[in-house]
Image (cartoon, helix red, strand yellow):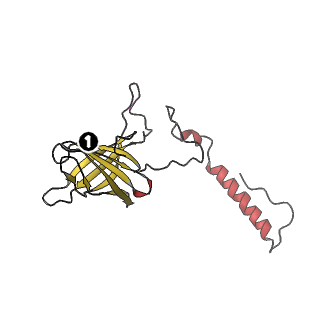
Amino acid sequence: MSASPVAGPIRKNDTMGKLAIRGRTLVAGLCLAIAPGAALAQPQPNIAVPIPPSGALIAPPSFNGCYAITQDLYGPYRMDFCLTQFGGGSYQVQGAAHCRGSLNWQIQAGQATVQLNYTTCTNNVGWSPDRLTCTILYVQPMLPPGVDPRVAIPIPPTYGGLQCLYQPSVPGYAPVPVIAERRYHATGAG
């Protein structure tokens, strides 16, 4: 297939004519490069997968929300905490004593640093101003029954909570890795 000539004579300084010839030559070359069966060589999905609407932006997961630490902390204590917008929040400790306190947090390099503020508790106990350093924990969802796992379409991981390192401010206590599950309702930590 060859490019058809531009109508009329082309002068030496006629740059528009040269651009028209180059443009037609480029189009002709692209037409030759795309063979009739090339589009069929693309992998075809064999299951329906939802696609976000055109132009939709999918926001990354946020640290904002309420969480519950899944294991005991330093004896018979359980902790819930809520991270609110603009770096504020609150926490609650239950167990041998009951505590309610405030916290501050910030994001740096993809992780949240949560600073608990000292608070007094019941039973003449106080909760120290400890720190949590957390990253978002992703989990791969389970495939429902009847779905072929060999289909080459990735299932995006979901946001499962936070993976944190709990760092006590009191000497003699070692840092503890903890998992904080996201709660979709306030757990009383507010």
Residue range in magenta is: 143-149
In this rendering, does residue 112 appear at all?
A: no
Residue 144 in view: yes
- Crowding at mark 1 (Cα within 10 Å: few <14, some 14-19, many 20+): few
At 62% across and 51% down in the image, what residue appears? 33
In the image, is residue 93 above or below residue 24?
above
Residue behind mark 1: 70
Residue 77 in which image quadrant? top left
Q: Nearer the viewer, residue 123 or 83?
A: 123
Percent coordinates x, y for residue 156 in the rendering? 42, 42
In this view of the protein, which residue sits in the foreground, 136 or 117? 117
Q: In x, y percent, where is residue 50?
A: 52, 36
- In the current view of this chain or complex, which residue is farthest to the left? 172
Q: Is 22 on the left or on the right of 45, as rendered?
A: right
Q: In this picture, is 147 found above or below 130?
A: above
Hey, what amino acid is under mark 1? Thr
Name the chief secondary structure element in magenta.
Answer: loop
- The verdict on residue 35 being magenta is no
Task: Tell which of 170 and 7 is nearer to you.
Answer: 170
Residue in the picture at 25% in, 48% down: 178
The image shows residue 46 at horizontal and vertical percentages of: 49, 32
At x 26%, y 41%, the residue is: 70
Q: Nearer the viewer, residue 4 or 48?
A: 48
